[in-house]
Every structure is written in C-alpha cells, then in structure tokens.
Image: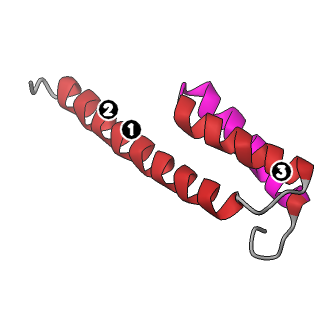
Amino acid sequence: MVASGDAWALRTSAHTLKGAAASICATAASTVAFALEKAGRDGTLDGVPDLVAQLTTEVHRLNLELSALAEATLAEGRGVS
C-alpha cells in the first residue's frame, strides 16, 4: 500500500493498528500509527517511509515486551521465580 501510493489503504490499516495498540496501552506504537493514519487521510505520503520504520521499531519493541511478559507469566504458573 505504501509502495503503490494507496493512501486510503494506508489510512484504514493504520487506523486499525492504532486502535489495537491503544487497547493494550502501547502508546508509542499507537502514536506512530496515528501519524500514518493522518498521512493517509491527508494523502501526504512523503514522510511515510520514515514513519513505517518507526512503527516497525515500536512493534518490535512491543513484541519483546510481550514475550518477556508471557515468559514471566508462564514461569509464575510453574512456580518458578
């Protein structure tokens, strides 16, 4: 969608991601997704590659945090400290 210049698809995808990130309090990812949503809504795609890179970083960071949380939760369930 970014490579093809499809601003509408960018807007709708970013809007969905923004909501999902906000629902789990992933503020940084939600903020970047909002910026992507706005770019898609406005049709201004010039800065989008940088925003996609930022979002990729934030999603990677979130994935690491969720993995650590899952491991800690599983360890607690097994009685491991």
Q: Residues within 10 Å of mark 2 (few under 14, many from 20)?
A: few
Viewed as shown, does residue 33 lie left or right of 80? right
Q: Is residue 52 magenta?
A: no
Query: Furthest residue to the bottom?
Result: 4
The residue singled out by tag 1 in the image is 66
The front one of 9 and 81 is 9
Which three-letter amino acid code belongs to the residue tagged 1? Leu
User: Relative to 9, is 26 above or below?
Assistant: above
Residue identifier under label 3 = 11
Instruction: Residue at 63%, 28% (x, y): give it.
Output: 22
Tell me if residue 8 comes above or below residue 31 in the rendering: below
Q: Are marks 3 and 1 in contact (CB under 8 Å)?
A: no
Q: Residue furthest left?
A: 81
Residue at which label 2 appears? 69
- What's the amino acid at mark 3? Arg
What residue occupies the far front of the structure in this picture? 46
Residue 45 numbered mark, or none? none
C-alpha span from label 3 to label 1: 26 Å
Look at label 2 and name its amino acid.
Leu
* In this rendering, the label closer to the viewer, 3 or 1: 3
Q: Where is residue 66 shown, x and y percent of the image?
A: 38, 38
Secondary element at image label 2:
helix
Left or right of residue 14: residue 40: right
Q: Is residue 24 magenta?
A: yes
Rendered location of residue 63, percent (x, y)? 41, 46
Marks 1 and 2: CB-CB under 8 Å? Answer: yes
Q: Are marks 2 and 3 in contact (CB under 8 Å)?
A: no
Instruction: Look at the image and give the residue range highlighted in magenta.
Output: 8-25
Q: Residue at x 32, y 32 (%)?
A: 69
